[in-house]
Amino acid sequence: MRWPDKATLYTVIFGTETPAGRRFDIILIVVILLSISVLFIDSIASVRAHYGGVLYWLEWGFTVLFTLEYAVRVYCAKKRLGYVRSFYGIVDILAVLPTYLAVLLPGASLLLMIRLLRVMRIFRVMKLVRYADEEQILWRSLKQSRRKITVFFSSLFILVTLFGSLLYAVEGPEYGFTSIPVSIYWAVVTITTVGFGDITPQTPLGQAIATLTMLLGYAIIAVPTGIITAHLGREIQRHRDQRRCPQCDKSGHEEDADFCKYCGGELEEPHPPTGQ
Amino acid sequence: MRWPDKATLYTVIFGTETPAGRRFDIILIVVILLSISVLFIDSIASVRAHYGGVLYWLEWGFTVLFTLEYAVRVYCAKKRLGYVRSFYGIVDILAVLPTYLAVLLPGASLLLMIRLLRVMRIFRVMKLVRYADEEQILWRSLKQSRRKITVFFSSLFILVTLFGSLLYAVEGPEYGFTSIPVSIYWAVVTITTVGFGDITPQTPLGQAIATLTMLLGYAIIAVPTGIITAHLGREIQRHRDQRRCPQCDKSGHEEDADFCKYCGGELEEPHPPTGQ
Amino acid sequence: MRWPDKATLYTVIFGTETPAGRRFDIILIVVILLSISVLFIDSIASVRAHYGGVLYWLEWGFTVLFTLEYAVRVYCAKKRLGYVRSFYGIVDILAVLPTYLAVLLPGASLLLMIRLLRVMRIFRVMKLVRYADEEQILWRSLKQSRRKITVFFSSLFILVTLFGSLLYAVEGPEYGFTSIPVSIYWAVVTITTVGFGDITPQTPLGQAIATLTMLLGYAIIAVPTGIITAHLGREIQRHRDQRRCPQCDKSGHEEDADFCKYCGGELEEPHPPTGQ
Amino acid sequence: MRWPDKATLYTVIFGTETPAGRRFDIILIVVILLSISVLFIDSIASVRAHYGGVLYWLEWGFTVLFTLEYAVRVYCAKKRLGYVRSFYGIVDILAVLPTYLAVLLPGASLLLMIRLLRVMRIFRVMKLVRYADEEQILWRSLKQSRRKITVFFSSLFILVTLFGSLLYAVEGPEYGFTSIPVSIYWAVVTITTVGFGDITPQTPLGQAIATLTMLLGYAIIAVPTGIITAHLGREIQRHRDQRRCPQCDKSGHEEDADFCKYCGGELEEPHPPTGQ
């Protein structure tokens, strides 16, 4: 096997269009997930006691591998400084540094969780296989409902602060509401219907106010759902309207249609709305 | 009473079209539910102490019954090997084996829960009574929103891992966050708004990050709901458009309409979209 | 003040159309709510210790009042036996009997909670003030999505039983999963995102399966919401289409419109769809 | 710097249209949030022990500042009595009084949380930057679904009272269900899927009824969501229909459109529906 030239390396490592490029990305994601799994099980005390040594060397193995990969990426990048300064360039270097740092600073290896961000490449890989549209629709829906969501979260903030302060005043430190920030934490736990139960009202008045908080949380959970749904419905409709038959130029095809329902002509793959 | 011939047996046992066939299936489902109930109450320590003997023999009674039924099914099946190898054939044999196995291996009787899968025949019975369409619509909606759901769960996975690791770093083993997997379990408990409260953040920083996790969980619960709703709405519309009056060929009838609203002609039962 | 005749009494007590009739119903509901409040606070140990006597006589006062009301209702009803046998007739007698019974059986007074069902008259009162339509729409939406909801709850039942049994097998009695019914209770607590935390998985495998249960619960909570929303949207549309201007016979008016947007003619109050 | 005249002061302090007016409001909101933060951290026992003195003087600083602001507001208001009696006028005076009161009554400083209501000015500021429409849509949706929501909460109230009383009767005081009000509190905690776990059913019958409560809560959470979503969808549609191109008078433009899609004419900013 000959050593591949710089252009081929670039296509394989940075590209996702060629089969080799996609294969490289998929292998990379698997290796990243493996290296994260090593971090996961290394955090279990009983496992570390038995296999700490193996995991330590596995960790170094992954770090050397990723360091080499980073070096090759810098070597074959078209604009070296551009890559080094890009989001992925910074993530790639941050994903190996902690292991070296941990030689000096023992706690630094936790920073290796930053490797998880490398998994976000998975979206880049999937983008090619028709996920782009779905992301587009989700994203546009969120963007369009941005202002409604801001109004909603501002109101939520005021509600949570008021109810939290109220319960701090009513229940007080002896029942676990030790300070206003802690009481606001309780109000968030309650209004989002999480309900840990680590802090709960004990006085009748506190329980009455808590009942009101819960009913409010129950009622307003409907608001963000309604906002997203209404916008999503419109985006899906709009997206469908923009997919035209290349033969007869008519729109309104189902998302899973492969042929035009008016003239039978083959439809193109759905694509993001133009001018986007 | 004469012993029924093979063809009649087949119609009764495998078929669901004839009244006898449907009656057999309904009785079978009731017997399966009864045998599962025996397993349920046998797992209660105090009940087993008193009625353990009765329940043991009931269990054997059901097993012998189901073994006989299996034998008859194999006997009268049109393609014997086909049935034995089919999903239901395998479930049917697995639903009796554990009792025999338990003679040798005491714990094996728990495997009898596999009988629950036999209850899924209930869908086959109900299918005939107009449920087919509903399943179709639900299924198509899920299939069409498959990609949006994949993007959603990938993001959820990254969020849960990041927040879990963050809380492991902030709170640490002394507050119950004993390892990263346990912390991820906590993050899932929190972001899905389940909130067991077996592990809860105790430090102010941990509670602040938990607050963020909960608000995120609260906000993004809207996304899958919005996705399903939007697609479901379109599927219901589409389904309605495809139900045509046999007389005047017009569509757009309400789901519960029995007569055409344009010409008064009797409408057929709604049926799954053609070409499905 | 003259003693009113039977017909006037009937109009006031049974009717809701006249101002006097509505006033009577509203006073009745307030008195019922008061009598229930007495039951509520009587159940608080510290209150009963101090005011037990007063509450006891208040309770007897309400009972005598409701007994008199029942007697008058029987007296002035058009068809006495018809009223006595009707739903409200039975509720009305059951709402006073427990107090008399409690003289003989001390625990019987708890049955007085049946008085709460008398509050359902509130819907009859509100029906006149435009609530009928809303109930209609909600009810029709639920009826139309009945089959989808059945499929949904059957699947939920199978899921909950499977996950419950699985956790009983994995965790076992030592971690609180004392029997299969208790484990199914846990599964319901988890999949509905309630999450009491009285029983929680402690083993890694149990926590992994619990994670799966929670994500499933999170995902499928979207299904009933989607079903209801989609049907509700259609019902609202349909309801709007059926409200016609009495002058120009055009439909499509906003729900809060009082005048026809095409000819300016006054619109009638919205009413339930005909033929319903 | 000259002392500004009364009219200029009015524009800056009360107005939000001029850059100076908006800048004043934003600074005011930041100062209010700071003064609330002081209250927050002052409630933490360990912080108060160390920095209690500093926080005390900070608190007095903010109070003097807000008192001065109130005096200037009264001075430059067009209708002095009108301002003093208005909602914001009352909130503004209530936001400073507690500090003075606390000299006599130590606990009064908690009332300073009323300052949070001053933050609601934030909506007035944001209104100018296009949030008016969103609030309009949210508000109209809530108003239109008001009656459905009333029916929903009445039913919820009856359900919660019935289930609460039922569990009080079944479980009783020994398992934490100490009174009917406490049991209703439990029922609200359960049906809203909050699930604190401070009170949980222990008897098999109690757990069975709790299972029913949870499934009901799970099912009916869909109803308010469905109601809001359906109305919100219609409001968004209606809002879009009312935005017309000033050139060709055609409607139906996307919310984010800046130019008419029919004639290319520039569109005005979306505005609340006329006659609203």
Image (cartoon, coloured by chain):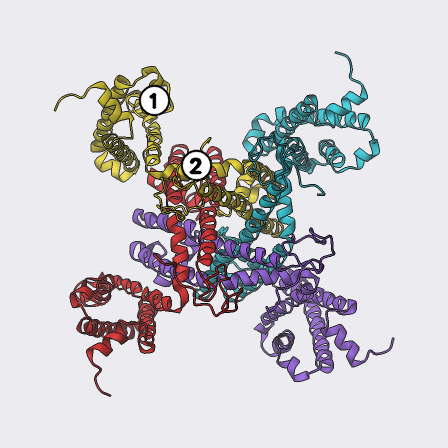
Chain colours: A purple, B cyan, C yellow, D red
Residue holding disc 1: C89
Quarter of the image for the C terminus of chain B: give it.
Answer: top right
Task: Tell me what residue is drawn at x 46 percent, y 64 percent.
Answer: D245
| Mark 2: amino acid | Gln
Q: Residue D163: x and y, percent?
A: 41, 36
**Closer-to-camera residue (C67/D21):** D21
Residue holding disc 2: C136
| Mark 1: amino acid | Gly
Q: Residue D148: x and y, percent?
A: 40, 43
Task: Tell me what residue is drawn at x 31 percent, y 64 percent.
Answer: D116
Q: Residue B147: x and y, percent?
A: 64, 56
Q: Farthest top residue?
A: B1
Contact (CB < 8 A) between labels 2 and 1?
Answer: no
**Rendered image quadrant of residue C91:** top left
**Closer-to-camera residue (C219/B140):** B140
User: As drawn, is C114 to the left or to the right of B39?
Assistant: left
Q: CA distance from mark 2 to mark 1?
A: 25 Å
- Helix, strand or loop at label 1? It is helix
